[in-house]
Amino acid sequence: MSVRWDRAAAAHLARRAGFGGTPAEIDALLAMGLEAAVSSFVAYDTIENSALEADLIRLTTPAPPATTATYDLNTTSGIQKWFLHRMVFTRRPLEEKMTLLWNNHFTSGIAKVNDATLILKQNKTERSLAIDRFDDLVLAITKDPAMILWLDNRTNVKGRPNENYARELMELFTLGVDRYTQKDVSDLARALTGWTIAKPDAAPVSEYAFSFNAAAHDAGVKTILGQTGNWNADEAIGILLNATDARGSISGRFLAGKLWTWFVYHDPPDWAIAEIASVYVSSGHSVRAMLDHLFRMPEFYEPHSRQALVRSPVEYIVAPLRQLEAKTDLSTPVASLNPMGQSLFNPLDAKGWEGDLDWVNTGTVFARATYTNSLVTNRGATGTRIDVAALLAGKSLSTARDVVSALADRLGLADALPASQAVWEKYVDSKADGSRGYWTNTPAAVDQKVRGLLHLMLTSPDYHLC
């Protein structure tokens, strides 16, 4: 089976490997062909992104006489804006999409860590290793000060082991449920003793750094997943990541399932997991290699793989900002996160957000509609706003169908259900009393009907799915 590479396939890749694309970006992907298009996402470190970094330096540096930056990185809202800004304006969308994945995989909550700087450092670690060897990321997160605080490994000492991180390291981070015993948890915790954090006595929490306390480390014999020895933390992590059973690499299947569920659809088939896990093994546990393979698989592009995932609140906020080329100070987007059910950097527990249909209830759907309304109705020069005339520049707008087609293409809804498209056309061509024949291509009609149509499209079931 081969991939039918057409505009719909290119738009699907842009939605899943990133946050959607503008028509010009989709056209560019289509012209590249499948191989180069996938490489443009996966080999993102070859893409120059200095404008984004320069912009973030400006926004996070106080401009005299102001003493506080636009994005104050000492606050939760400040680091949320910083992360959202990266997602909206980056030229490397997969880099941020993977950082968002790891942010929900290796969770740490600011409510317990109680320091925005440490949470931000963890986010930067996740980004820097996002598609490198999985082993390197797991090791770095195990040494991360925010994680050590979040899952209590600083209280994990010889003679009084704290098992919190050891349990989650196996169940949530590397192996999955039912892949270990309580004995494995206990001995893994012993191997992790002494991995702690330290700072100068008078220094703030933000100066915590990883520290190994040899006196607190249990150097005794431990048995982890059937292997016995005087294991230290590095060796124990290696045992987890190299563990096998009759079906091959356990961590490989676990990670393959995670990536498939994040990028393709839920309940992945065994054959797909086995195929991607084999890439994990042959590549030396490279996440980049796994993604490169996944985005070339015909199954990724099949009709049943499209519109199969519910956009998370973060994705629901970021995607239209990118697709509509919005201008934003990110105040409204950040304020909308919590009502939608996803306060970045503050998950409820170590499992992170369940996602999928858990994102959708009467309260969160209303919050989505409220956010969308604020986006499309803001006609001012500040805040989060769009230029509707610029969005349709150069488009034929003779009929209501033309308008719907132009905006559906921009929002990745060209393949939306025919019934949805019919409703949108009826809205564009309807007068206030419900009669037809309204649409004329005038500035007033564009301003009124295009903004209303965007709200209908963005709040439709078609757009909640991606």
Image: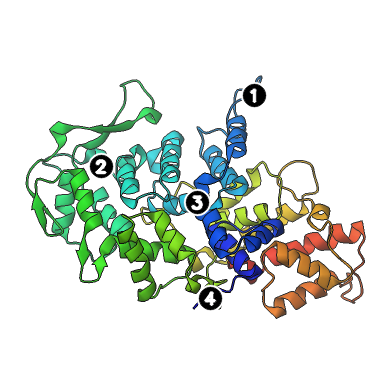
Tell me whether the residue at label 2 lies in contact with that at label 3, contact meaning CB atoms closer than 8 angstroms.
no
Tell me whether the residue at label 1 lies in contact with that at label 4, contact meaning CB atoms closer than 8 angstroms.
no
Which disc is residue 302 wearing?
4
Position of residue 75 relative to residue 276, above or below, is: above
Q: Which residue is mark 2?
A: 153
What's the distance in space between the residues labelled 2 and 1, CA to CA?
A: 39 Å
Q: Earlier in the sequence, mark 1 or mark 3?
A: 3
Q: Which residue is mark 1?
A: 63
* Residue 316 appears anywhere in the view: yes
Q: Earlier in the sequence, mark 4 or mark 2?
A: 2
What's the distance in space between the residues labelled 1 and 4, CA to CA?
A: 50 Å
Q: Nearer the viewer, residue 73 or 121?
A: 121
Q: Secondary structure at mark 3?
A: loop
User: Which residue: 66% across, 56% down?
Assistant: 25
Q: Earlier in the sequence, mark 2 or mark 3?
A: 3
Q: Secondary structure at mark 2?
A: helix
Type of amino acid under label 1: Ala
Type of amino acid under label 2: Asn
Position of residue 64 relative to residue 257, above or below, is: above
Which disc is residue 43 wearing?
3
Q: Earlier in the sequence, mark 2 or mark 1?
A: 1
Tell me whether the residue at label 4 lies in contact with that at label 3, contact meaning CB atoms closer than 8 angstroms.
no
* Residue 355 appears anywhere in the view: no
Residue 237, given in percent of the width and then of the height, sits at 23, 49
Q: Secondary structure at mark 4?
A: loop
Instruction: Specify few, some or many for label 4: CA neighbours under 10 Å numbering under 14, 14-19, or 20 or more.
Output: few
Position of residue 415 relative to residue 183, above or below, is: below
Type of amino acid under label 3: Ala
What's the distance in space between the residues labelled 4 and 3, CA to CA?
A: 24 Å
User: Which residue: 66% across, 58% down?
Assistant: 28
In front of the other: label 2 or label 3? 3
Residue 297, given in percent of the width and then of the height, sits at 47, 70
